[in-house]
Amino acid sequence: MKSNKFTFWKENIGRSWYKFSRNKLSVIGLALFILLILAAILAPFITPFPKHAGNYVDLILGSQAPDGTHLLGTDIYGRDMFSRIIFALRPALLMGIMVLALVVPIGTILGLIAGYHKGKFSDHIIMRFTDIFLGLPPLILALAVSSILKPTLTNSMIAVSVAFWPWYSRLVYNMVISIKNEHYVISSELLGESKIHILFKEILPNCLSPIFTKMTLDFGWVIIMTASLSFVGLGEQPPDPSLGTMVAEGARLLPDKWWVAIYPAFTIVLMVLSLNLIGDGVRDMFTATEE
Amino acid sequence: MGDNYLLKVENLTVDYKVYGGYLKVLDGVNFYIKNNERVGIIGETGCGKTTTMKSILRLQTNNAVIRQGKIMVGDQNILEMNDKDFHAFRRKGLAMIFQEPMIALNPVFTIGQQIEDVIYYASDTKLSRADLKQKARDVIASVSLPDADRILSNYPFQLSGGMRQRICIALAISMAQKLLIADEPTTALDVTIQAQILELIDQISKQRKMSLILISHSLGLTRNTTDRMYVMYAGVMIESCPTKQLYENPLHPYTVGLLKSIPRLTGGEFSNGIPGRLPDYMNPLPGCRFQDRCSRSMDICRRQKPVEIEVEPEHYVACFLFDHNGDNQ
Amino acid sequence: MKDLDLIKIENVKKYFSIGKNLFVKALDGIDLEIKRGETVGLVGESGSGKSTLAYTLMGMYEPTEGKISFKNEDIGSKAQKRDLSIKREMQIVFQDPSGSLNPRRTVLNILSRPLLLHKIVKKNELKKKLIELLDSVELPQEYLYKFTPSIGGGEKQLVAIARAIATNPEFLILDEPTSSLDVSVQGKIINTLMKLKNKLNLTYLFITHDMSLMRNVADRIAIMYLGKIMELATTREFFENPLHPYTKMLLSSIPVISAEEENLLPKEIKSSGEIPSPVNLPEGCRFITRCPYAVDICKNSEPELLEKEPGHFSRCHQ
């Protein structure tokens, strides 16, 4: 009997992949992103100079142009750019995962509660609070929070989360206010179901599509924001490698020793680009097609 | 056979490309309509009636593949016309009104703007603004709507469903000369308005000697508004005959089953309808597409596809109960 | 006498405020009794208020005025405030099963909830009861594990019906149960509903615009127009001796499929004029804008729903 559920999911995944893969660029984006994840995980094994990702200084080799040994050159401290960039992928990806893991549940739950109680006190409180945060430019907000806290990876995660949560709250809120009028929700209410059941078992499963699509695109934004924070020195501190810090360090050396700034910047672009390409595919995946 | 036919669909076979393969929706559709004739098409949701109409208007989605078949208008196969010629032809000759009047009208433009647009683009000569306005008023009047200026300045949401559908009809007929396709034109409307709209369509088609294709899932609606009927099932025209005969002497088991399941004003029992569902278009069984729901299916139905046979004058059925040319008979 | 009335609706009004002191008078004084065991049919076009009445009975809306009693108990409040037992005894089947069944839940989940919530069975008897339930609407066991988007319209509606009868209700509202289904499956739904009614001793409020269907299922019929009942009579009287002009207009528009049925219908009454806005109802009779028989008195005073013949009520001055 359980086989029906299995075949249903199998077919569902197959169909979703079909829709996703119709967009060739999305598949490229996905491949690229998977490559980046693997590179981050396998960093100690695939980089030529893993020690350069830590406290290593060799000023003689400082700011060397890219050559055979150092594929992407060295930075001002003589550290291999390629190795540092690969290691820098870790905090970037970690930030994306952690921020979303924090922001999505909180924003979703708030949106569910506010949307379901539209017009009532809890709606007003939650959504006005959301609106306040939405009104502030996210980067400024993240910078402000960051500057109050000590500059660490964890704290920049908190700062970026503060800037991101209201978007999910608003997204889910908008979905809930229309879903709650669907007859299947009303049927549950008329039956006497508890609110918890209705919110999490009836309404939430129908909100997942836009949430997932947004998550894919937001991952890229989180990376950019993280890089921005560390660019101004409010994120991961040296000597731990962070793309934003690396761009900052290299900025002073432009345009002569361009590789120090350009390669980390390019990596950021690559990460965000791959995520945006995936985002297009995810959106298509969730679009119901006429069959 | 030539000049009395307005449109002739021959052996139209259309697939849709989807995840997992192809949906073989139309399986050799044969259909014709003469000048100044009203034809009804009855069929359940998913039987292919909209696909057929879209093929005629060449409004198909990207994933539609025409495997074979012709759609002849006069001596031209419109499936082979180039885009430019076809657009000119469609603009002057054909028009379609859809089921949901709210979707067919653009909610952010006034009625007047939308009508004027149609007139402007369909017209051969350049029309002045005053001309356009007057023609728009004429269009409103042609569907018996009073107060033309007020309606022209209204947005679709300000009008009732019945009025919106009238406007869609007006738009459709304002430029079309030869053929009007009405796809479930009254499904979204109340019964009293329904009667009005059907009468309007009837009146207009007779007045302008336009041919009419009326698509519906309701057998009650097509009875008094058509001259000839087609019953469509799973991409095949399984029965066709003059309207009166369909109701008095239905032949195909599907048609018979359908009529038996309709509640009557005269009371009495009505059946459970036709058990089962439309076939899997991805992997249709060989032979007759109705075989798995037919209470009278025979061995041959599973092996061969029935073709349309003339059982009585003008009464065609695609069924082996009437076709004795099958391989084992 | 009192014991027979399962539902008693007394002068129920439901006004929706649309700001600026304007109201949409969806229900404007409804009086109706539904006796145990009967099927009362409710007819009306869009804007008539028939769905509003159904929703108000179920507790989706609270009446602006008036009293609703179920088994002599006042239930004129929103569903949340009602007793669990009332919720168990009154159920509704909505028009569109694609909307009334959660596309993200299996049939098993959907049908289990009413059984568990109202403690109809214990957990260990759940599976058995579910199969029984599917049986009573003639659906195979395998459907338990299906998600509703993968099953056909008619079958979805059968699941919705199964859900409604799961709690062993006494009263069922059917809001256009077959209107969004294909003709080929409508018969099954209706026949199933009638079988269940007899088997489980149910009382139905049956809403539909399909008059031929109404003829075959209803014992009594009420026709609504802009929030008021225009005519109320037994089915036979309704069709053979319609009194109200609106009823006659409606009956003359029914699309039928045979000449003998056509002969039963009143001669066509041309429907002219537009439906007035429910925010701005005319003085006097609300049907005046479309009535071919309107005279002066109709413009000035609104007629009452009077018993013109035994058991046959009409709201018309003539």
Image: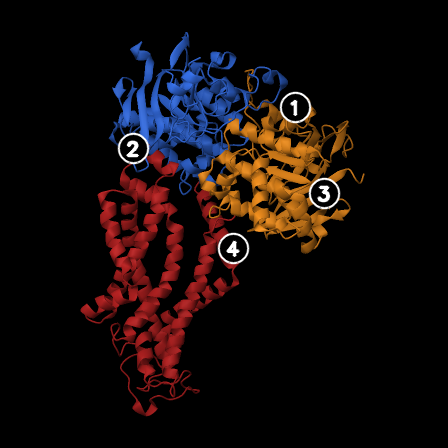
Q: Along the line of sight, which residue is nearer the eye, B254 or B166?
A: B166
The kind of secondary structure element at disc 3 is strand
Q: Can you identify the residue that label 4 sits on?
A: A18
- Dot 3 falls on which chain? B
Q: Can you identify the residue that label 2 sits on?
A: A192
* Chain coloured blue here: C
* Chain coloured orange here: B
Q: CA–CA distance between discs 2 and 4?
A: 40 Å
Q: Residues within 10 Å of mark 1 (few under 14, many from 20)?
A: many
- Rendered residue at 48%/42% (across/down): B156
Task: Give me the disc on residue C110.
Answer: none
The kind of secondary structure element at disc 1 is helix
The kind of secondary structure element at disc 4 is helix
User: Pointer 3 and pointer 1: residues touching (CB < 8 Å)?
Assistant: no
Q: Can you identify the residue that label 3 sits on?
A: B11
Q: Residues within 10 Å of mark 4 (few under 14, many from 20)?
A: some
Left or right: B230 as drawn, with respect to A174? right
Closer to viewer: mark 2 or mark 3 = 3
Q: Can you identify the residue that label 1 sits on?
A: B247
Q: Mark 4: which amino acid?
A: Tyr
Asked if residue B285 can be seen in this view, the reply is: yes
Closer to viewer: mark 2 or mark 1 = 1
User: Pointer 2 and pointer 3: residues touching (CB < 8 Å)?
Assistant: no
Q: Along the line of sight, which residue is nearer the eye, C289 or B79?
A: C289
Q: Residues within 10 Å of mark 3 (few under 14, many from 20)?
A: some
Q: CA–CA distance between discs 4 and 1?
A: 46 Å
